[in-house]
Image (cartoon, helix red, strand yellow):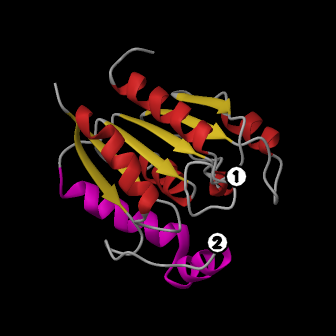
Amino acid sequence: MPVNILIVSDIFGLNDSTDFISQFLSSLGHIKVFDPYETQKMHFSDEQQAYDYFTSIGGVNNYADKLICSLQLGEVVDFAIGFSVGGSALWQISSVMQKPLIKRQMCFYPNQVRHMTHLSPQCATTVLLPQSEQHFCVQTLAKNIQNKALVDVSFVEALHGFMNESSQYFNAVARQAWLDKIKDTVQGKN
């Protein structure tokens, strides 16, 4: 049975990586990609330029507000996947949903969650943390959220951005391994 899958992009928005991931998962059902730039493809020269622009248009709180408005207009999402600020936005909105809009979510390197540890998602949530982060201790974040109901925390043998070709830390092998795991998870194989 086809499922509704939502991909919530990072600060780079729509790019070759979101296209690749969407295509890879397309056999599972309906794929929707949500990005901070209202489907306009941006062409940032580097991560700093992307970050500066993203913060200039409201940052993660604004992104989460737009995401929840979009979700309230559509069908319930069976499986959501968020990358970086996308994962942080999922964490934020899934903690305050008035009605279930997402059944299950996977948040890749959602570093802003460190500022939202008081929130608790209301759907099954897998948080995937990188080996390390430049600005904070990932082990401390894991400790602060791992005992929450519905939350599972795992560490990935890669760095923040490994799923995105636009990131300096892109890792094709790790991306493929996690795409295979996502597919298995959606199909109920693990």
Q: Which mark is residue 114?
A: 1
Please state which amino acid type lies under the numbered disc 2.
Glu
Gap in Å between the C-alphas at discs 1 and 2?
A: 20 Å
The 10 Å Cα crowd at callout 1, few under 14, some 14 to 19, many 20 or more, is some
Q: Nearer the viewer, residue 95 or 80?
A: 80
Q: Residue placed at 55% from the left, 27% from the top? A: 149
Q: Residue placed at 55% from the left, 60% from the top? A: 85
Vertically, is 189 above or below 180? above
The magenta stretch is 47-74
- Observer able to see residue 176: yes
Choose top left, top right, bottom left or bottom right for residue 54. Answer: bottom right
Element assignment for label 1: helix
Q: Which mark is residue 13?
A: none
Name which of mark 1 and mark 2 comes first in the sequence.
Answer: 2
Picture coordinates of residue 157, whole percent (x, y): 72, 35
In the image: residue 143, left or right of residue 98: right
Picture coordinates of residue 189, whole percent (x, y): 40, 14
Q: Which mark is residue 47?
A: 2
- Observer able to see residue 97: no
Picture coordinates of residue 150, whole percent (x, y): 51, 28
The single residue placed furthest to the top in the displayed view is 189
